Amino acid sequence: MNVCITPRRFTGTFKIPASKSHTIRQLLIASLADGESVIKYPLDSLDTRSCLCACKAFGAEIAEERNGDEIISWKVRGNGGFKKGVGAHTVIDVGNSGTTLYLALAAAGLQKQPIEFTGDEQIQKRSAAPLLDALAALGVNSHSNNGCAPITISGKWKGGKVSLHSPTSQYLSALLIAAPLAPAGTVTEIEVPLLNEKPYIEMTLSYLKAHGIPYNNLPDFSFFSIPGGSSWKAFSSSVPGDFSSAAFPAAATAITGGSVTLLGLDPQDTQGDKFFFEMLEKMGCDVQYSDNGENGQSITVSRGGSLRGGTFDLNKTPDLLPAAAVTAAFADGDTRLVNVAHARIKETDRIAVMMQELAKLGIRCTELPDGLVIHGKGALSAMPSPVIDGHGDHRIVMSFAVAALGSPVPVEITTAECAAVTYPGFIEKIIG
């Protein structure tokens, strides 16, 4: 679907959706546990629904509690590390969810029954080859289309020592979640010569710690040793707000000079994308944290003066690149977004796509092998009736939706429906 967004100042108070990264981890962990877990206030989006379907295919029983349109909780009765097995010729469609694909691939290697994974057109272009190679060295069988879906997995996990390049942290998180469930006496050792997105490994390890699962690692995360024979335990937990999603309304107010208060965010959470608020401060915004009682922590972002450019290392937070790039378009001077080559292996090559689409709004960029330089001029000079190609990428769509608010003319954006992958209702908030 195409939407046309009219320029306006963006202001208000908004409850931020729950974290996709936490929701998917909790769903998979609950499905691999024994007993009933309760996931409170999860993200209900296209990606998390894809994960929910995968968990049901793994043998979990899932019921939901609603209050009108809002999901209050998902109650998940797990399959105890596949103790009931899975059905013959199980096929799991992960839709557009790369997180679900990578994390579930490793979990599927814990049992002998073949499980086939497929997904949409974008997923079928995203390689899982480094993860599949590591799984093969651990005794897990796989068949794929040159590392891409459709991928068929079957175990069982034998353990051993592997080397895993992790241009996306999801490869390593996948092994960390599955390895503890390998047979007792099995040890999985992982050398990690390359690791991007370190905060997401910290997030995964926080779950191992919370469940009392033993592991050893070097401080720089270049090596892990995980003994088998452990189990994930049933739990009850609320899902914190998503800093990745919060970046977009925050960018909207930075661009338009408004003020927003964002509810449900925990500044102490492991999510790396909270770095966006540090960026906004350095670019000239005012960022205030406060306790909102029953709504938890809140963040208020406002801008009085001009935005200014800067240099920002996005290695730990590649999902910020689209929101950061459009914000930089409205800053005075150059903004360098660097050390983020792995933004090219997301749903799209986000470095190339952002440069291509920003040009339609009159913004010149210089493409780097590992990032972008945005030559900001404080405002847009868009061509008449610009049409932005959203490329079916939720973060591209949302970033240009907020950029459109500061455009001198209305902006049309294609494939706007894909914003629901992580932020249902976002486009409606932007349109107002």
Image (cartoon, helix red, strand yellow):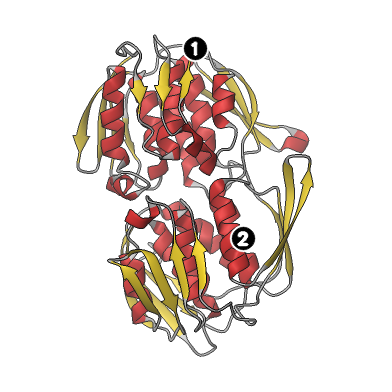
- Measured in 3D between alpha carbons, the distance from the residue under mark 2 to the one under mark 1, in whole angstroms, is 42 Å
What kind of residue is marked 2?
Leu
- Total numbered labels placed on residues in the image: 2
What kind of residue is marked 1?
Gly
Q: Residue at x 73, y 36 (%)?
A: 295
State the mark number for residue 384: none
Vertical arrangement, residue 148 with respect to residue 307, above or below: below
Vertical arrangement, residue 168 with respect to residue 186, above or below: above
Q: Position of residue 167 (x, y in %)?
A: 32, 57
State the mark number for residue 304: 1
Q: Position of residue 72 (x, y in %)?
A: 75, 47
**In which quadrant of the rendered view does residue 70 lie?**
top right
Contact between labelled residues 1 and 2, with CB atoms less than 8 Å apart: no
**In which quadrant of the rendered view does residue 220 lie?**
bottom left
Q: Residue at x 51, y 79 (%)?
A: 110
Front in this rendered view, residue 74 or 245: 74
Secondary structure state at the residue bearing disc 1: loop
Front in this rendered view, residue 10 or 150: 150
Say which of marks 2 and 1 sits in front. Answer: 2
**Can the viewer see residue 21 in this picture?**
yes
**Residue to which mark 2 is pinned:** 27
Indicate left or right for 204 with 63 as reference.
left
Dot 1 crowding, Cα within 10 Å, few <14, some 14–19, many 20+: few
Label whose residue precedes the other's in the sequence (2 or 1): 2
Front in this rendered view, residue 123 or 376: 123
Q: Position of residue 166 (x, y in %)?
A: 34, 61
